[in-house]
Image (cartoon, coloured by chain):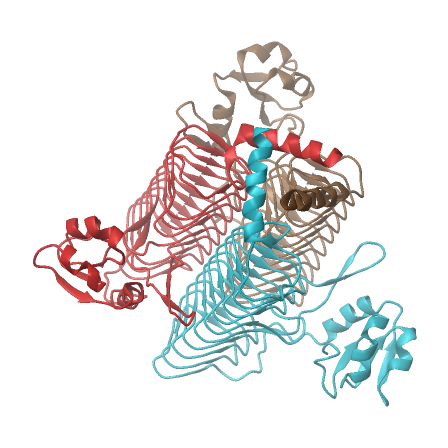
Chain colours: A cyan, B brown, C red
Amino acid sequence: MNDLSHASAGQLSFAEHKKYTTDLQNSKASAFLIPENLIEALPKNSSYIVCENVSISMAYATKLFAPRKIDFKAPDPLRGEGTYIDERANIEDGVIIGKNSTIMAGVYLGSHVFIGDNTTIYPNAVIYRDCVIGNDCIIHGGTVVGADGFGFSHTAMGEHIKIYQNGNVVIEDDVEIGANCAIDRAVFGSTVIKKGVKLDNFIHIGHNCEIGEYSLFVAQSGVGGSTKLGRNCVVSGQSAFTDHLDIAPFSTFTARSGITKSIKEPKGVWSGYPLMPHKEWMKLQSKIAKLIKE
Amino acid sequence: MNDLSHASAGQLSFAEHKKYTTDLQNSKASAFLIPENLIEALPKNSSYIVCENVSISMAYATKLFAPRKIDFKAPDPLRGEGTYIDERANIEDGVIIGKNSTIMAGVYLGSHVFIGDNTTIYPNAVIYRDCVIGNDCIIHGGTVVGADGFGFSHTAMGEHIKIYQNGNVVIEDDVEIGANCAIDRAVFGSTVIKKGVKLDNFIHIGHNCEIGEYSLFVAQSGVGGSTKLGRNCVVSGQSAFTDHLDIAPFSTFTARSGITKSIKEPKGVWSGYPLMPHKEWMKLQSKIAKLIKE
Amino acid sequence: MNDLSHASAGQLSFAEHKKYTTDLQNSKASAFLIPENLIEALPKNSSYIVCENVSISMAYATKLFAPRKIDFKAPDPLRGEGTYIDERANIEDGVIIGKNSTIMAGVYLGSHVFIGDNTTIYPNAVIYRDCVIGNDCIIHGGTVVGADGFGFSHTAMGEHIKIYQNGNVVIEDDVEIGANCAIDRAVFGSTVIKKGVKLDNFIHIGHNCEIGEYSLFVAQSGVGGSTKLGRNCVVSGQSAFTDHLDIAPFSTFTARSGITKSIKEPKGVWSGYPLMPHKEWMKLQSKIAKLIKE
């Protein structure tokens, strides 16, 4: 199961609104969940199920594609030369770890986790099944990589139907993640933390985000689902991004920025909530100072 | 030990100010910690201790009622059919788990924890003693349920005397809690997360809160002690409630709302800090945009 | 290795800018990393290495002084009378624990950790190597003490070179730390949480901070590196301090304060971001209320 643009032959996809007509026409999926008014837009020879509420049907369908939480049939863990796995770490089957890595006590590695060379995972960090961590990474204690993204479909009665999060997290090389962070797994595909990124403590990265190379996040910041940051962004403390944004590379955000719109121009310095250029924010502050004295 | 309105016969309660006179007169507790000026308001035949500083005496008294951290005399864990308890989970005595539930490696379940059917607790989550989790729940890695609420009595010298948190947490059915959340146990009684609630990552719920059915919390939001939310509230990212508020059902709060007063009117949409109706906040933002250009 | 003012004979230190000339002249370190223009300011008989980029050379040098993550040659743990160490806790070598303390299941104590008397560490908390925790402390589940501070040196190409954090954390007596907090270890020397401090859940304390006696932090607040708070400060929820500040004792910060400058006057009440006296903030709010109605 996958979204319209990423699905390949043999996969199930879905389209909810007319605005996805073009994506639907071009999709390579073999079967679709669609509303009645999209039947004509289907690629030739597609299978489909007409749904009254595509979002809710999609949510229920994700559950059918969810893997078991633990895979007892997977092969025993493989490890490279010089790698130390503490015997008090909890490793599921099918894990592969490269050379000279260190897995400390109380760490959990789910089924089929892959970890590269020279990587250290500190005590009690949790890596959910199928996640991938590169070379030369450091993941600190209490951090959770690969928990379910926050995705629900909502019924008319106000109940929330879980959309099973069947993707994973990919952390590239030379990434450091602080203590007690949470990087959610993708609903389909991967949440990606690119090469050289450094995250402070308590960073929240939503499902399907992509954090550009060498970006920095200061403590207690968060990124909503599917938001993409370009390379070398700097995000100061307690900042937050809403979901589905596209942020230009080399953007800098001062403390407690609230970013709700995409940014096209690279190298900007931004502040405030609602967000504005840092210079305007400085101007606003001096106007506010005057306002108080009036 | 319990507060004036919840205490039953045989329990110890306390009253600190004259404003609690009516509650004191109606209380069913058998004994009271009170200041001298409340003796006349006591129910007939009550036992009492006159305290110079009721708050501090109360704090010290809570310690006497604190259960042991681990109860070695409790019965062995009971589990229903189809339930998988990973042998690397750490389970104290007296735990009861229903059918078809999954307790993964590194999970801690304190003494007398009760867990229902079809519930999954992901690795390294911690459930403190006496907490109750319903059916069809999902609790993600690193989340802590039932740690002590933040309650202290303060001496004239500026020291803080711990008020032992002797209540518990009750999580009803169909609740999902993200990674690295913290739901504090009640000082007396229960902190309650009602049916169908969904919490994203890093949600803080203070002691004695009650979160209404089907409410949603987006990442990094928090609720101060004893605040009650009605059903189907939507709380966007990085929002926070102070303590002792009463929030009407179907209230929506946009990102980074700061809620310091109770809300009586249901179905409102709110923004900002200080909080205001979302429409006013939008108006304010356009005024601020003008102010910058002036 | 240590900074100019704390280094003693036999240690390596560093100076990056001319503004550190006096500190350099007075330093007791035996060897220095310096730029060429500081050679003349060196104390007599010092060894030195001239660096093109002192910050990056310093970052690389810290790695040479990093201890092993686990010290297999340390002595077996020592414990005082009445101390309970759960056999499912993960204790490295060289740990010393006082009398009547409780170390619960899933707790990690790194090499050479010292814990005093009557202290309780709740399940799955993580204490990294070399950290010190006093008497009568309570540390709740999921909290991480001693993870690396967020320190990097940046290359001209935008890469980040890790500054190894070779200091520790010292938590004095009678401190309570809530669930899922993160107190980072110092780069050199110690991050210090002083006597009687109480931290709610999700508190972030950066490297080399010093939190004054009996200070209180409400949930989801954070302190940037090297900031020092005087005694009895009160920090309300979701507040944050930038780095390298000096905060006068008895300062109070209302919810979501953003503190970016040092505070010299004790006993102030502060609000807002940018920060202002609470009275001014109240005035500003009434002006804003008027502005909306205009």
In the displayed structure, would residue C61 be above or below residue B144?
below
> Along the horizontal axis of the image, is B174 left or right of C192?
right
Number of marks drawn: 0
The picture places residue A40, in percent across and down from the top left corner, at 91, 81
Quadrant (top left/top right/bottom left/bottom right) for the N terminus of chain C: bottom left
**Residue C261 pos. (x, y %):** 43, 41
Quadrant housing residue A138: bottom left
Residue B75 image point, x, y percent: 55, 52
Which is nearer the eye, B27 or C55? C55
Which residue is painted at 70% across and 80% down in the image?
Answer: A6
Q: Which sits in the foreground, A292 or C64?
A: A292
Residue B211, horizontal then vertical, whole percent: 69, 45
Q: Is residue A15 above or below residue C288?
A: below
* Residue in view at x 35 percent, y 54 percent: C185
Q: In what quadrant of the picture does the C terminus of chain C appear?
A: top right
Q: Nearer the viewer, residue C57 or A121?
A: C57
